[in-house]
Amino acid sequence: MRGGEAELRYLDGDFEVLKPGTHVVCAVTGQAIALEDLRYWSVARQEAYVNAVASLQAEDAGQTKDA
């Protein structure tokens, strides 16, 4: 993806741009996600996810670590 990676603060239902860029990287797949396409993230982990499946995988992995 052209352009730099953005740095975001993930909030409930929104995010704040800390460092401008065109995309973020999915914490599970490593896939670039254009900011305009970003729909899934974790406020607690401050991570972005490419889709709902990746979000659930991260949640499952987090629960395994906590157990």
Image: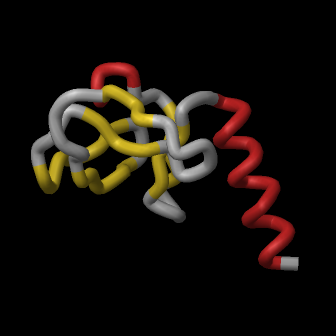
Q: How many marks?
A: 0
* Residue 49, image x, y percentages: 54, 40
What residue lies at 29% left-to-right and 55% top-to-bottom?
9
What residue lies at 79% left-to-right and 77% top-to-bottom?
66
Q: How is the image coloured?
A: secondary structure
Can you say whether 64 is above or below 18 in the image?
Answer: below
Which of these two is toward me, 25 or 65?
25
Can you say whether 59 is above or below 44 in the image?
Answer: above
- Left or right, residue 58 beside residue 42: right
On-image quarter of the N terminus = top left
Q: Within the image, what quadrant is residue 13 found in?
A: top left
* Residue 34, image x, y percentages: 32, 27
What residue lies at 15% left-to-right and 55% top-to-bottom?
18
Can you say whether 31 is above or below 7 in the image?
Answer: above
Report the residue that reaches farthest toward the left: 20
On-image quarter of the C terminus = bottom right
- Left or right, residue 7 beside residue 56: left
What residue lies at 52% left-to-right and 63% top-to-bottom?
44
* Residue 21, image x, y percentages: 16, 40
Report the residue that reaches farthest toward the top: 37
- Left or right, residue 56 beside residue 64: left
